Image: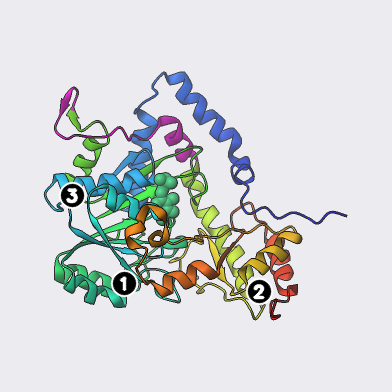
Amino acid sequence: MRNKQYPFLSLAAVNGPLLDEIAQAVERVVRSGRYVGGPEVERFERTLAEYEGTRYAVGCANGLDALRLIFRGYIEMGQLKAGNKVIVPANTYIASILAVTDCGLTPVLVEPDACTLNLDTKRLRQVAEHQDVKAILTVHLYGRCCYDNELEAVARELGLLIIEDNAQAIGARCPMNGRRTGALGHAAAFSFYPTKNLGAMGDAGAVTTDDEQLATAVRAIANYGSDRRYHNIYQGLNSRLDPIQAAILNVKLPYLATENGHRQAVAEIYEHSISNSAITRPLWADDGSMVWHQYVIQCRKRDLLRQRLDEKGVATDIHYATPPHRQPCYSAWSGLSLPETERIANTVVSLPISSAVSLSDAREIAAIINTINLNTDD
Ligand SMILES: *Cc1c(COP(=O)(O)O)cnc(C)c1O
């Protein structure tokens, strides 16, 4: 008999329960005849700003563009200049860093904390003081809030901009002040790539901020740099939020709390059931500061673990196997030594987690993991 299969992420299963509502929303857009901008986009921007507790939300085409638009906005406003240094976590998805270099800014890679896997804020002050840094890009990786007193104090004392990459953490809250990720710094970038906790059915993104000038600049840059029709004050881009995607996001945003709640329940089962001594579970959190975009374990025998799991029908993934400083596009950094980042890249394994993973599936996956013998020398 063939094993039961546990897919890593079935997006059709995640979105299936909302099919009727989504189909109606898409039909509304099709019938409206309004295919760029319009009421669905405006409604999503309004609800996202309300959800976040920020004054402004501006839709755009994707998460990478959201970051680029923020940096471009600050450059147009004179708050950043080409060549300025921006602290970025060395352990992140490469898009965080692509946005910095695309805008002619210089990333300063900082190692992660071994427990959170996020930017190690204890290393910030030294780097920021010695390298004339102008901004910090904090990434809430895997859905875990990366913002604390130390980060805030360094930024305040040195007058640095704080920009959040909130692509993976929508719905998380900062334990320090109870505010949502995406409302912690000066501006935040969101991705609604289909696999994110709030996923569209194509590319989509947004910027949130309390800064009116930045919101206005971002909106203009995303629309060919025009402040009014056929009048261009910036050499802009075309990066607008598609109304069909906005309509889908309007359907899905009210269910985000359910999605994140289910992920928390799956994580809780993994936390209490995975007992294989060759595996390190992620730092536990049940205070809302972690929305489990990924459930990332660490294992020195990663390839063997993945192979055994695959044989038993459990699909896994790696986020991320090659850190940005080891990518061919950043060959200038190939000599950099970032041992913590490299250790993480060599040991992480992501387990299935989403509303498509039932609680009984999670128990079965944990039980399968516990049967695998990884304490051999092969
Ligand atoms: C997904 C992601 C992005 C990029 O978002 P896209 O919508 O795919 O462009 C940026 N940063 C992080 C951390 C991400 O996970």
Structural crowding at the residue carrying mark 1, measured as other residues with C-alpha within 10 Å and reported as few (<14), some (14–19) or many (≥20): some
Pick the quarter of the image with the N terminus: bottom right
Please name the residue that numbered disc 1 is placed on.
148
Element class at badge 1: loop
Which numbered disc, 2 or 1, marks the residue that appears first in the sequence?
1
Q: How far apart are marks 3 and 1 (CA)?
A: 23 Å
Which numbered disc, 3 or 2, marks the residue that appears first in the sequence?
3
Residue 129 lies, in percent from the top left, at 17, 73
Element class at badge 2: loop
Q: Residue lying furthest right in this view?
A: 1
Q: Give the range drawn in magenta.
A: 228-251
Q: How many labels does the image show?
A: 3
Look at 27% across and 71% down and name the residue there.
151
Classify residue 45 by image quadrant. Answer: top left
Q: Which mark is residue 274?
A: 2
Q: Which of marks 3 and 1 is in front?
A: 3
Return the residue nearer the eye: 99 or 332.
Answer: 332
Mark 1 belongs to which amino acid?
Asp
Return the residue nearer the eye: 336 or 21.
Answer: 336
Q: Residue lying furthest left in this view?
A: 78
Q: How far apart are marks 3 and 2 (CA)?
A: 45 Å
Residue 36, above or below 353: above
Pick the quarter of the image with the C terminus: bottom right
Q: Is residue 31 a member of the stretch shown in magenta?
A: no
Mark 3 in CB contact with mark 2 (< 8 angstroms): no
Return the residue nearer the eye: 259 or 333.
Answer: 333
Q: Which mark is residue 74?
A: 3
Residue 134 lies, in percent from the top left, at 18, 61
Which numbered disc, 3 or 1, marks the residue that appears first in the sequence?
3
